[in-house]
Amino acid sequence: MILKPQINLNWFQIHHHLSYILFIVITIFMLKLSTFTSVLMSFMTLFFASSAFAQLQMPQPSPSAMLKQTVGLTDITIDYSSPAMRDREIFGGLVPYGEMWRTGANKATAITFSEDVTIEGKKVEAGSYAVFTIPTQDKWTIILNKNTEQWGAGKYDEKEDAIRLTAKPSKAPMTFQRMTFMILALENHTAEISLLWADTKVSFMVDANPVKQVVSNIESTLKQADNLWYTYAQSAEYYIDNNQNKEEALEWINKSISLNDHYYNNWVKARVLASRNNTGGVSSDASAAVKMAKKAMEMGEKENTNFYKRLKPQIEQFIKTYSQQLPVKGKGKRN
């Protein structure tokens, strides 16, 4: 006799087991689908990344350029994009006359001054400015605008102007295929800033006079310069060279000599004396000035350094000039 197992399952039990089996099947399917999707996405990412790296790098039609020059104690920086001529007529053509121009390509050209400056007699505070221009055949309007975050001149607002000035265009020394800025430092505190493109040159002058900054630096340094004779002498010389307080310069040079009696500070004192109470080119301290200059030469000849050799022609000319102001014994003062 063979015994057969009896399976007594009601509908509820069958439904429960079927649901459980179906859940397991769906779960396995979803895991496989998720794995497949993940692999596919990874492949696509690698494909597009490889495609991106494979892209050619081509020269930009208007590459970016940056120019920096120190004038006096001020750093002047110009950041711009440089378009090319490409056989086009530039001014009066690509750049229309009488219309606002961003003075370059892409983002508006920006000029930055690290310190306050004077441009064509107008004071400009330290900071960054967008450069806009309005070219014409005979006259350009140059604008420095406070809003540097401009792409083109579409959002230009005259209320944001720092200064406006006019400049006369001239012929460039050569044909400039690309728009170019130049900063030509002239004296120790002035510079000519020029825009050159095609056959046109437009310039304006910047004065970064550092006297105020240097005076502040001198006063700060001297508070810590208890025994620095050279600092006192150098400060005194700067004061008389830049028409600052002569009495203070005399005080400093005397302090310098008391610390170290040297040909350099004796020479500076001669110049300080000659600059005091100077009326009509004749100094009341001429005699003392000549005496100090001669002492400086005697001391300098003994040391005969390269520094002294550079000063010697100046000292000799100084003695010659101021000796002519001294009275000749028995004949009164020379004319």
Image: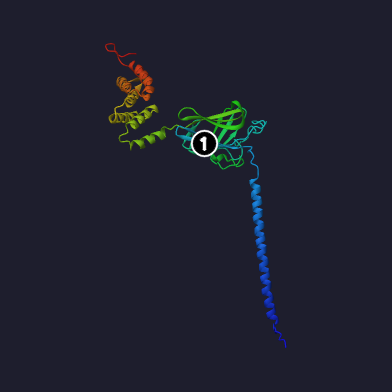
Residue at 65% in and 58% down: 39
Residue extending farthest bottom: 1
Can you say which quadrant of the picture contains the N terminus?
Answer: bottom right
Q: Quadrant of residue 14?
A: bottom right
SS state under label 1: strand
| Residue at the spot 57% in from the left edge and 29% down from the top edge | 202
Evaluate whether residue 280 shows in this view.
no
Q: Quadrant of the C terminus?
A: top left
In the figure, is residue 42 to the left or right of 303?
A: right
* Numbered-mark total: 1
Residue sitting at the far right? 1
Near mark 1 (Cα within 10 A), the count class, few <14, some 14-19 or many ≥20, is: some
Where residue 219 sits, quadrant-wise, is: top left
**Which is more toward the observer, 335 or 88?**
88
| Colouring mode (rainbow / by chain / secondary structure / one colour) | rainbow
Provide residue 94's location: percent of width, then percent of height. Answer: 66, 33
Question: Depth check: 45 or 217 in front?
Answer: 45
Q: Is residue 15 above or below residue 212?
A: below
Evaluate whether residue 319 shows in this view: yes
Residue 110 image point, x, y percent = 55, 38
Q: Is residue 140 left or right of residue 280?
A: right
Image vertical order of residue 38 relative to residue 120, above or below: below
Please state which amino acid type lies under the numbered disc 1.
Answer: Thr
Residue 98 location in percent, x, y?
A: 63, 33
Report x, y in % for residue 58. 64, 39
Location of mark 1 (residue)? 77
Residue 269 image-quadrant placement: top left
